Image (cartoon, grey):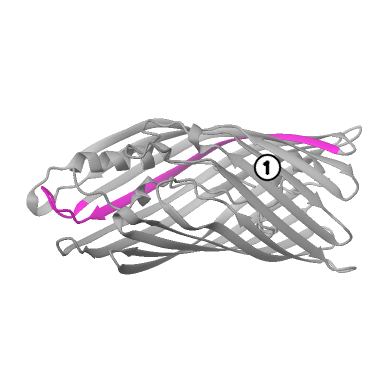
């Protein structure tokens, strides 16, 4: 499983409330409080097809992001690459009026090179990876009429950005049944957001534009152990991710009301909390069954802004426990495998009422050609529904991903 590799926390949680404080207008649905870069899905089509449940089973180049201990199982030089196509549908209802938007993108998701070194016994493997951990495109338009005074409302949020992680790591087989590994990473990226809404006060058609460069670093360490044949267990500890944000927020001229242009600078740091995951993998006959559980206490997120709702005194973000399960079936005497998975990955933002928590279903297949070339494909659908009754707002998001992974072993 892969957790957060980058998040514009200070921007999302500090700048958005500041905007409303400075304009003094009525609040709009709090989607602008959402961490924009937050991808907890795994790399690699094989593991995506199994719901992301891979902490105890991963054994290829994707280990560097899921559980680095799995690198020690690689016995030949391996070059692994993954391409992803993503489609996002956003259906929003505000004051009874519904709007829908669809977006899609295609990009290289990861490229990893793993190199085993000769050892007297066991194995030692080093790996390097470049991965687009977060490819984010979102465009939400909301409009409706407030029954109190029959006043029309309209606003929109348009987000775009890419975060690239540059990772290096290694793993060691410390005994015939035990593996340990580590990885460190730095990341670079950009985040742009444009918010527009109609307000009634001193300005009309207000617009705010974020232009931010994102950077940071983090690390993880993991282990895998085979206590008995056909059973493996794994654990991974992900250290806090330190985030840096530099850029500006531009509020253009207010239009007919003549509001002056304002530019706010952003130069902040934020820290995301520790994450601890456990996994188990059982391989009876031609099956592989996996289960992962990963806990993150988002209360410990540190950033230059409020951590609690000023009205209810509740934390803006809450602790989550991700649960993932997967199954793989290999045909006897044939190099084909078929996979399915399910994941429940709760939303971190505690500002909405969740009517359907975030869940994923996935399917996939793979083939091995002469023990050298591996093809894996996966499809995943993730969806959730939530509402903010105080704002007469509700939304449904559906995200479809199609992944293709090729791995060549020299």
Q: Secondary structure at mark 1?
A: helix
- The answer to whether residue 378 is above or below residue 390 is below
Q: Verify whether residue 341 appears in magenta.
A: no
- The answer to whether residue 144 is above or below residue 350 is below
Q: Which residues are magenta?
A: 178-206
- Residue 268's quadrant in the figure? top left
Residue 325 drawn at (x, y percent):
70, 55
The residue that appears at 41% across and 38% down in the rendered structure is 314
- Report if residue 285 is visible in the image: yes
The residue that appears at 78% across and 46% down in the rendered structure is 77
Give whichever of 94, 281 is nearer the camera. Answer: 94
- The answer to whether residue 243 is above or below residue 356 is above
- Residue 336's quadrant in the figure? bottom right
Residue 312 drawn at (x, y percent):
36, 39
Position of residue 44 in the picture relative to residue 193 (left or right): right
Task: Look at mark 1 in the image and give the residue it sits on.
Answer: 64
Position of residue 3 in the picture relative to residue 392 (left or right): right
The residue that appears at 65% across and 59% down in the rendered structure is 342
Give whichever of 64, 270 is nearer the camera. Answer: 270
The residue that appears at 37% across and 68% down in the rendered structure is 100
């Amino acid at each position: 499983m892969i957790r957060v590799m980058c998040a514009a926390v200070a921007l999302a949680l500090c700048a958005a409330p500041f905007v409303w404080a400075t304009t003094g207008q009525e609040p709009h649905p709090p989607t602008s409080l959402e961490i924009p870069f937050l991808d907890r899905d795994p790399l690699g089509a094989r593991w995506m097809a199994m719901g992301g449940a891979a902490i105890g089973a991963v054994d290829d180049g994707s280990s560097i992001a899921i559980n680095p201990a799995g690198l020690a199982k690689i016995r030949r030089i391996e070059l692994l690459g993954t391409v992803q196509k993503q489609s996002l549908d956003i259906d929003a209802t505000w004051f009874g009026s519904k709007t829908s938007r669809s977006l899609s993108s295609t990009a290289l998701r990861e490229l990893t090179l793993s190199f085993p070194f000769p050892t007297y016994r066991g194995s030692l493997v080093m790996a390097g990876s470049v991965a687009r951990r977060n490819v984010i495109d979102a465009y939400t338009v909301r409009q409706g009429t407030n029954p109190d005074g029959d006043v029309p409302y309209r606003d929109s949020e348009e987000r775009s950005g890419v975060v690239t992680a540059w990772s290096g790591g290694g793993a060691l087989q410390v005994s015939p049944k035990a593996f340990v590994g580590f990885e460190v990473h730095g990341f670079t990226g950009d985040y742009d957001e444009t918010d527009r809404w109609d307000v009634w006060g001193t300005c009309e058609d207000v617009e705010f534009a974020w232009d931010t460069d994102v950077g940071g670093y983090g690390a993880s360490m993991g282990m895998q152990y085979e206590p008995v044949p056909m059973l493996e267990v794994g654990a991974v500890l992900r250290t806090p991710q330190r985030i840096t944000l530099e850029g500006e927020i531009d509020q253009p001229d207010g239009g007919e009301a003549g509001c002056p242009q304002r530019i706010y600078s952003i130069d902040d740091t934020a820290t995301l909390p520790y994450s601890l995951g456990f996994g188990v993998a059982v391989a009876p006959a031609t099956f592989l069954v996996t289960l992962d559980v990963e806990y993150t206490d988002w209360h410990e997120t540190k950033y230059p802004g409020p951590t609690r709702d000023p009205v209810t005194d509740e934390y803006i973000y809450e602790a989550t426990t991700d649960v993932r399960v997967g199954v793989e079936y290999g045909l006897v005497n044939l190099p084909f495998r078929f996979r399915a998975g399910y994941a429940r990955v709760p939303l971190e933002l505690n500002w909405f009422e969740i009517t359907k928590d975030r869940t994923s279903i996935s399917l996939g297949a793979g083939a091995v050609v002469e023990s050298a070339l591996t093809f894996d494909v996966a499809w995943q659908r993730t969806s959730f529904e939530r509402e903010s009754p105080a704002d007469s707002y509700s939304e449904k998001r559906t995200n479809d991903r199609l992944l293709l992974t090729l791995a060549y072993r020299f």
